[in-house]
Image (cartoon, coloured by chain):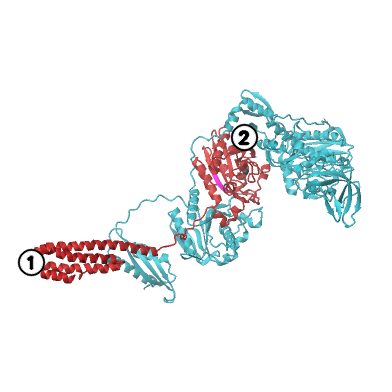
Amino acid sequence: MFEKIKIFFEELETDSLESKKDVLEDILSLAKEEGLIEIDKGKKVDDLKIVQTKYFGKKGIISDLMKYMGKVSNKDKPILGKIIHNFKTTLEDKLNQRFTVLKKTEINAKLETEKIDITLPGTNSQRGHKHPLTLVEEQIKEIFTNIGFTVVEGFEIEEDYYNFERLNIPKDHPAREMQDTFYLNEDVVLRTHTSPVQARIMDKMCPQLPVKIIAPGKVFRRDDDSTHSPMFHQIEGLMVDKNITFADLKGVLLHLVKSIFGEERKIRLRPSYFPFTEPSAEVDVSCGNCNQEGCRVCGYTGWLEILGSGMVHPSVLEMAGYNSNEVTGFAFGIGIERIAMLKYGIDDMRLLFDNDLRFLEQF
Amino acid sequence: MKVSLNWLEQYFNEKLDGFEIEAILTKLGLEVENREKLDLSFSNVVVGKIESLEKHPNADKLQICSINVGEKENLQIVTGALNIYVGMKVPVALVGSKVVGGNISESKLRGISSYGMLCSGTELNMDSSLLSDNEKDGILPLSEDLELGEDLLDVFSLHDEVLDLGLTPNRADCYGIYNIAKEIILKKDYKLKKIEFLKGDLSKENFKIKINNENLCHRYVARIVKDVNIKPSPLWFANLLRNVGVRPINNIVDITNYVMFELGQPMHAFDFDKLEGSKIVVEEAYDGETFITLDGKERKLDKDMLLIKDGVKAVALAGVMGGYNSEVDNNTKNILFEAAHFNSASIRRTSRKLGLRSEASGRFERGLSEENAIKAMDRAMYLVELLGAGKVEKSYFEAYPIKQIIPTITSTTEKVNAILGMNIASEEIIKIYEKLNFNVKIEDDKLLVTPEAHRIDVKSEIDLVEEVVRIYGYENIPATLPVGATNTIKVDYKIKLVEQIKNYLVDNGLNEIVSYSFIDKSSYEKCGYATLADERLKVMNPLSENQSYMREKLLPGIIEIASRNYKRQRRNIPIFEIGRVFKGTVNKLPEETLKLGIFILENEVKEWYGKVKNDFFTLKGILEKLISTISNKELKFERLTELETLHPGRAANIIANNQIIGQIGEIHPNVLSEYDIKEKAFYLELELEGFDEPKVKQYKSLPKYPSIERDMALIIPKDLNYAKIFKTISDASNNMVVKCRIFDIFEGSQIEEDMKSVAFSLTYQDPDKTMIDEDVSTIHNSIINTLVERFGAKLR
Ligand SMILES: [Zn+2]
């Protein structure tokens, strides 16, 4: 080709390119075809770079062609320029196109080699677990704080006076038999229930109204078997105000049970006895395991006992300084272990205190 | 308290249904813990008579009996029993019958066919406490007057159902089955039959009753029965007792037990001829006095215990158990029956101290009405005549120094409804009182209500409210939500704090545990806390030694649990506990302090992405992030060497606001080995008191000028710590260094002994202008000079 071009320009007379351009175009068109084929042949970016250099490099074909620009007459310059430009852009476009395709292919090929096993576990993905008793306690606290109760706490080691006497259980009262008590000394006990908080908070608040608290915490009784633990957890609830009724107690407990166990569950109040409430009620929730058909879980009764409750006994109010003719109240005590066992289907209370991580990690 | 339906049915003209009775009692607040049909444990067992006995030809220990069970032909039964004889009446389990232990079928014993089995009491499901000594071993001897072939279920009246009640302390009256019958008619329209009494005249002649301490004995009633004929009670009477769990003994003792189960009033029968002084004296024992109770045991008494004396000697431990010396026996001719009212607290203390509990003491402890005593006596006398047990004297003796006061309670319908949140009509309320057999008087809008004598639990208006709603039905209470003013109690920040901390720790991979608040004294020593175990925190009556001290530290509980998991091959043990610890004080109550304990095991593992393990700094990082999450406190750490709990070179006090708030460190290898943990573990215990709600942070404007980073590599003395270096750098830079990141620490052979190589990246920033390289270099060099001068550092 170069020979042909060289000869073409040697033979070219001044200002005659216009008439001879067909010949030049024919020569270049052949070169163009050749170039396009070369570009297509390149299978890698590097191949293509060689082709690029051949045509567009400092010593490349285009640059060679450009040399003739200086050799032709001023009149022929634009004509030659156009012809070279045409030749150049066609190859350039093709080259760029081909570069894009090859680069993409090459990146894809590279990324293909960087493949990882996306099913491998993430690093440091381990989370911890709250104890199921905490989960239940937090849920109950939330239910009550949402309806205006305040969370307070009492002492775990308590005076006999608050644990018993202020709750209408003087020394020698037969009700002391209901709860076997741990003593530190004659006047100090490990609290057997969260109920002393009732007296403590009323002492603090009287004569203000309303008193509307719940008090979670540890309690202790001398009992140890598959259904009793010497230490367990309760949540005490107390509401004292003018015009608080037994019906209000039932309403609040119904709300509690439905919030924990679901809307479809029912409650049953049974008369019972606690020295510090009267009337008193044991509260049962309908068995969710058998839909009250009767099963092993509910002892074939359709009901599960979950808490004790009642109207605050007038003398408990009086001892705190409230006038029991003007003020009434209700109180309840929920066993957190009991709720946790029912909620999560735990069949042995000891699991809650064994703290086997295989157990704890399930919550 | 066991209640048999057969017994209850005596008071009604109806057949009772166990399921229904259970439902009624439950609704009334008498909890039924168990209901049991008695005729399910055996079947097809009949009365038979042994007509002949011969030795088994092939076995020394077996005999072949010919038994008449009222059929044409006798049954041949092979038995190994020893206590049998010709003419004896025995329970015979026929072929095809069921007894405790299995079904009976025809069998061959050493070649001889046997068509049935002779039964022991156990095989008929009789509790051994219901059997006398000669009934306990071998075949159960039956009464001679039983008809041959009679079904044993009929003989023992076992077509019965027994309810086991868990009575609350306020309803001691329901330890009498007749009072339970009174409860049933509150919910069921049955007619209650009146029971019969044999009343007497009050005598003041020849026999005296003297009560020395009236507070301990409000009433004592005695009546004499002469010419008694001690023999077994008739079967129907004995069966009633057996079905409620009482072993029949003889007619006189059975009558006292029967009355106790019917009316709740314990009674006692003395052999009158064994009383010497012709009087009854109720008085306290003296310290050290001894007395033999009728179980034959000698009891050591003290001055708080009440005795019944006959003027010469003690004859009974009042309300608890009779005396051996005045026991009724087969030769007894005359009886003195006792029905009394004793102080419940005194009886409880006595029975506690002696460890002697009886059906009687259990009832006295819970409290009885004084009026009950005379009723019980009259009922017992009626039964004596009914059973033909003796001649009842016309008159009775009594001391009744403190009369029962039956209150008249004023109440209004309005008040009752105000407490219940209901709208029960006055008429309805009055009807309820009438059903209860309470006396009602109407005065204007007030009701004056007098309860029945045995209802000593009804003392005030609130007790009436309870009665009304109990009988009206708890199921009829509406469910409402309280209305009223909002609460103004401020929430203790600690409560929020704990929830926040738990959330943080759980998010960071730690698991919450809950351990017991009481621990073993020896665990302090195991944990290296040699000086702990305050005697003021010792439980007087622990369940066991390992739960006898209230904890002063969380570690013993936590490490115990860690160890338990470790023994289960667990190696990943990141756990924490938040709970209270205690400190004995001069005050009544110990101090309670909320603490957090975190335990992690080194747990070096190869993961697919490399080796990972925990160390001191893992735990320190958890702590630092925690503190900055919950407060604005700045933490400082000071080396702690004197503790035996933590590694002396790897432990620190955690300090905030110049106060030690906890410890952090690697657990001492000695402690770990006590708990069989064979790798490193790290622990921190932090006090959670004193974390007040952090002040709201105020925004600081962002730095206006760029910062510049420069590295620095130095050789410094080994024991020069990071905190000190940073302080020096910060001071020397005139606070132009805002961050000092340590990125390499190196010790080893290439470095002089006692020295280490440290590399820092310092971030310089001037709040007022853009720093140029020259400025930075000047400060950087002056820092280096300071470090060189002060600590002998060398540039690397
Ligand atoms: Zn069920």
Residue placed most toward the observer, B391 or A84: A84
Residue placed most toward the observer, B64 or B474: B64
User: Residue B408 in the image: x percent, y percent?
Assistant: 67, 29
The verdict on residue B734 being magenta is: no
Q: Which mark is residue A138?
A: none
In the rendered structure, the colour chosen for chain B is cyan
Callout 2: SS: helix
Q: Is the residue marked by circle 1 packed among few (<14), some (14-19), or many (20+) residues within 10 Å? A: few
Q: For residue B667, say whether it is visible.
A: yes
The quadrant in which the C terminus of chain B is found is bottom left
Give the quarter of the image for residue A177.
top right
What is the chain letter for disc 2?
Answer: B
Query: Quick check: B431 left or right of B342?
Result: left
User: Residue B140 in the image: x percent, y percent?
Assistant: 84, 47
Which chain is assigned red? Answer: A
> Which residues make up the magenta segment?
A214-218
Residue with the most extreme top position: B444
Q: Which mark is residue A14?
A: 1
User: Residue B476 in the image: x percent, y percent?
Assistant: 60, 32
Callout 1: SS: loop
- Residue at 52 percent across and 40 percent down: it is A212
Q: Which residue does the numbered mark 2 point to in the structure image?
A: B474
The verdict on residue A215 being magenta is: yes
A271, above or below A95, in the image: above
The quadrant in which the N terminus of chain B is found is top right
